Image (spheres, rainbow, N blue to C red):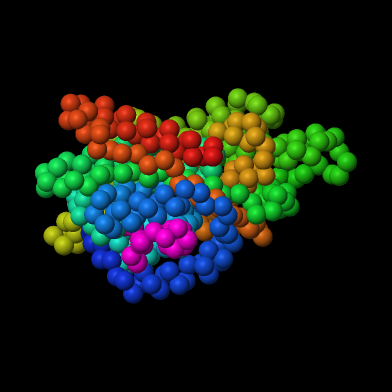
């Protein structure tokens, strides 16, 4: 496992107050095409943008409070959402004669952990673009209060990824967290309390990435690179060890890569015999082994932090993360005697090391053995291979290392049917949990429908 980067206990994480700064927004808007180009991301078809432009105009006119719920399959999603709001919406408004004042923007929730690994400059920039940091895994009252105020009375719409984190799959929607639906109902209540008549509207947005050219060459380069890192020796040319059909050949290589990675991690956790069992397409052993590995890694972290293994994999990861942060980022350091401070540093290092078990599980939390098998498209191969690449790079202490010759991709943006929260307020007052769950289900159905568009 990678060495823990934390070497000492640190002051408690402070809240980074959003401070929207117009000049930085203008600068980022000018730089956006170059940044997308550096990521080799092109903008494909954009559908539903006229309706979004009309809703943005209605929000500017004080008729609605707008909550944007966007799918989060990739770390480049914030850039694509910026393209949608900063470029595509104003362009559509001009074409259709919609009166829309500038700037067109949204404030947004982001993970408080981003400035920890991306650097303080990232936190500074996110704050000045209007971002609200939230700590996952606990009730972050200050973040929720700030976001609630911005949704009800802020100058811009509020954007939230209801999946809570990237799941790295374009065609697989992850579990939705209830926070977005709860935020919508809070806004409804706040508007009623203030005697205001704005509607609260949720706008689903789906982002679909695909290779710009339907070319298998990047897939083959990734397969070869991963085989090299894992020490897999391919049979000589013409040997009958792998199926002869090209698609089966690639899938066989993917199975060997997955099996070798699992075997090496099982050896690390001392699971199984250490032998590398053969895998075949559709073999349930792959899924079973992955589940056992996840359970073992999470148990290692939970045992250290004295946590019970409750909930889904992602819920367990969030609780582990929060427990680790409490051990690393402390508000009592100033009062510690020298020995106490040294012991606090020791605890912080141990916490960081045990967080690594949880980080490993996060990489594979959304993976399943049937995703590629049921639809062996070039895009699904790329998604799975990039997950494996990122996980291995992280284990090797090379987080962020780019894969060999990354392929150019384009993203399609689909704005789904808006969802009105106000008509459900009476249901919310009768049974809050049920109403939140029902609104979350409606949002999920809308996102899934947009994914099929």
The answer to which of 110 and 96 lies nearer the viewer is: 96
Residue 115 sits above or below residue 211 on the image: below
Residue 95 on image: x %, y %? 47, 61
Residue 333 on image: x %, y %? 19, 59
- Counting labels gives 0
**Quarter of the image holding residue 14?**
bottom left
State the quadrant of the C terminus: top right
106 within the magenta span: yes
The answer to which of 144 and 404 lies nearer the viewer is: 144
Residue 95 sits above or below residue 164 on the image: below
Horizontally, residue 209 falls left or right of residue 25, namely: right
Residue 443 sits above or below residue 338 on the image: above
The answer to which of 252 and 295 lies nearer the viewer is: 252
Horizontally, residue 307 falls left or right of residue 172, namely: left
Horizontally, residue 210 falls left or right of residue 147, namely: right
Can see residue 326?
A: no
The magenta stretch is 89-109
**Quarter of the image holding residue 183?**
top left
Name of the residue lying farthest toward the right: 238
Going 63% across and 45% down the picture, which residue do you hit? 379
Residue 433 on image: x %, y %? 24, 29
Going 11% across and 48% down the picture, which residue do you hit? 194
Residue 33 on image: x %, y %? 52, 67
Going 75% across and 35% down the picture, which residue do you hit? 248
């Amino acid at each position: 496992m990678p060495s823990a980067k934390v070497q000492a206990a640190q002051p408690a994480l402070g809240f980074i107050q959003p401070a929207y700064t117009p000049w930085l927004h203008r600068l980022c808007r000018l730089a956006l095409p170059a940044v997308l180009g550096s990521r080799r991301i092109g903008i494909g078809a954009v559908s539903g943008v006229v309706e979004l432009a009309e809703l943005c105009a209605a929000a500017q006119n004080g008729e609605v409070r707008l909550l944007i719920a966007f799918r989060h399959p990739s770390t480049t999603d914030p850039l694509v959402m910026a393209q949608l709001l900063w470029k595509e919406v104003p362009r559509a408004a001009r074409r259709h004669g919609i009166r829309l004042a500038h700037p067109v923007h949204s404030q947004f929730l982001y993970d408080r952990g981003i400035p920890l690994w991306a650097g303080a400059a990232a936190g500074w920039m996110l704050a000045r673009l209007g971002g609200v940091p939230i700590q996952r895994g606990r009730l972050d009252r200050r973040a929720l209060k700030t976001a609630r105020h911005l949704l009800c009375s802020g100058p811009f719409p509020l954007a939230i990824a209801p999946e809570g984190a990237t799941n790295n799959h374009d065609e697989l929607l992850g579990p939705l967290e209830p926070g977005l639906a709860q935020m919508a109902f809070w806004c409804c209540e706040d508007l009623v309390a203030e005697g205001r008549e704005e509607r609260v509207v949720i706008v689903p947005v789906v982002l679909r990435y695909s290779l710009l050219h339907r070319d298998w060459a990047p897939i083959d380069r990734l397969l070869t690179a991963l085989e090299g890192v894992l020490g897999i020796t391919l049979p000589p040319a013409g040997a009958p060890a792998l199926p002869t059909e090209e698609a089966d050949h690639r899938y066989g290589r993917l199975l060997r890569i997955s099996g070798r990675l699992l075997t090496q991690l099982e050896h690390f956790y001392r699971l199984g015999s250490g032998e590398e069992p053969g895998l075949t397409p559709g073999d349930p052993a792959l899924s079973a082994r992955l589940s056992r590995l996840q359970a073992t890694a999470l148990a290692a972290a939970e045992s250290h932090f004295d946590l019970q293994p409750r909930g889904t994999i992602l819920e367990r990861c969030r609780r582990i993360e929060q427990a680790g942060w409490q051990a690393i980022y402390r508000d009592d350091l100033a009062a510690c005697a020298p020995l106490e401070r040294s012991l606090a540093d020791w605890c912080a290092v141990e916490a960081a090391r045990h967080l690594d078990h949880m980080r490993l599980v996060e990489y594979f939390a959304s993976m399943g053995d049937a995703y590629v098998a049921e639809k062996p498209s070039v895009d699904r191969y790329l998604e799975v291979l990039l997950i494996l690449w990122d996980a291995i790079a992280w284990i090797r202490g090379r987080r962020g290392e780019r894969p060999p010759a990354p392929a150019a991709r384009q993203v399609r943006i689909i704005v789904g049917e808006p969802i009105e929260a106000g008509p459900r307020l009476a249901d919310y007052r009768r049974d809050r949990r049920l109403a939140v769950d029902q609104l979350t289900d409606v949002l999920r159905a809308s996102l899934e429908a947009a994914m099929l568009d």
